[in-house]
């Protein structure tokens, strides 16, 4: 047995002075005056550890579920311009004026050009929508002050 | 006592003497030490169910209250402090034939650095393990063990002239 062990045993053999009865009485009085202190509170230490663990687990599960379900949305391809459809029945109708007819009418006078346009326009006349078509055609075929005034 | 008990007197009877002795290492008079233990024990009893190791927590409460007391005492600088320093009340229950040796041990214990004395008190008379001491002091267990070894070495050197029984 070395010196350390002997000294430790000697120290252990000493008994500290016990607390006074006055101290015990004061503690008893203080605990009695506040009964809520004497009652043991429920052990919430474990709960405090569990709450963040459960919350983290739920958040992690939600994150995994979202990442598994999520797929990148396909980027729509830009719409290619469709070629204009040509109505061959209209384009090849021999009854309609040709480019040469319009050229000749325009060379003669604007009035004849207008008359040619009016004759074969889909509306067939200036009557119904005269307000909308007449100025446009006039501008295309001639420039005069009255037409500019209407615009 | 390591088992839980809802009877405060059981706790106090088991640890009261060691708690007062621990407080005595940090204050000068027995009356002050008992005031500290009273406050610490009430605080411990309110909150003991929320800690993993109530015994270590009880000693930690006493130590914390003693440190608070020291700080407030320094601020107040009360006049009776000087008189209190001269008080030499026995720390241990002794017999007449062992009184000289006991006084020598008490003196050696008082001359230890505070951080070593509190470890010796907790280990020897509080019967705490080094992990419990470490928890109470918020230090690593190895540090607690080394402080204890240094303290025993110093005590042995201080008591070298005294015969060891």
Image (tube, rainbow, N blue to C red):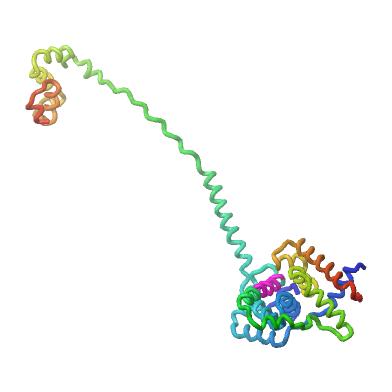
Residue A90 rendering spot, x and y as whole percentages: 21, 19
Residue at image position (87%, 81%) is B100
Image quadrant assignment for residue B83: bottom right
Q: Return the residue nearer the eye: A146 or A43.
A: A146
Q: With respect to residue B148, does A58 lie above or below?
A: above
Image-based side of B2 in relation to A76, left or right: right
Say which quarter of the image contains residue B160: bottom right
Q: How many marks?
A: 0
Residue for point 63% across, 81% down: B78
Q: Is residue A115 above or below residue A65?
A: above
Q: Is residue A40 visible?
A: no
Q: Which region of the structure is painted magenta? A: B56-67
Question: Going 22% across and 17% down the picture, which residue do you hit?
Answer: A91
Quick check: A56 above or below B156?
Answer: above
**Could you tell me what secondary structure mostly forms the magenta stretch?**
helix
Vertically, is A96 above or below B100? above
């Amino acid at each position: 047995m070395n010196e350390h062990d002997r000294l430790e045993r000697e120290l252990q053999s000493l008994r500290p002075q016990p607390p006074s009865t006055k101290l015990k009485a004061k503690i008893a009085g203080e605990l009695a005056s506040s009964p809520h202190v004497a009652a043991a509170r429920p052990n919430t230490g474990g709960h405090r550890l569990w709450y963040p663990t459960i919350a983290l687990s739920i958040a992690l599960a939600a994150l995994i579920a979202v990442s598994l379900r999520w797929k990148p949305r396909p980027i729509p391809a830009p719409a290619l311009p469709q070629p204009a459809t040509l109505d061959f029945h209209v384009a090849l109708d021999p009854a309609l004026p040709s480019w040469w007819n319009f050229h000749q009418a325009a060379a003669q006078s604007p009035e004849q050009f207008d008359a040619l346009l009016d004759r074969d326009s889909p509306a067939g006349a200036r009557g119904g929508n005269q307000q909308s078509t007449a100025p446009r055609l006039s501008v295309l075929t001639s420039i005069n002050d009255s037409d500019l005034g209407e615009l | 006592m390591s088992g839980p008990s809802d009877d405060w007197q059981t706790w106090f009877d088991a640890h009261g003497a060691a708690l007062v002795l621990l407080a005595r290492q940090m204050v000068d008079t027995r009356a002050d030490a008992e005031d500290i233990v009273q406050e610490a024990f009430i605080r411990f009893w309110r909150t003991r169910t929320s800690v993993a190791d109530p015994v270590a927590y009880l000693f930690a409460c006493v130590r914390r209250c003693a440190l608070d007391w020291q700080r407030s005492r320094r601020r107040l600088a009360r006049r009776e402090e000087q008189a209190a320093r001269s008080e030499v009340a026995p720390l241990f229950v002794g017999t007449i034939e062992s009184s000289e040796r006991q006084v020598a041990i008490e003196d050696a214990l008082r001359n230890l650095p505070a951080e070593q004395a509190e470890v010796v008190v907790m280990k020897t008379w509080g019967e705490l393990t080094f992990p419990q001491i470490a928890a109470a002091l918020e230090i690593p267990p190895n540090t607690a063990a080394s402080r204890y070894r240094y303290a025993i070495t110093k005590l042995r050197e201080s008591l070298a002239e005294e015969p060891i029984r």
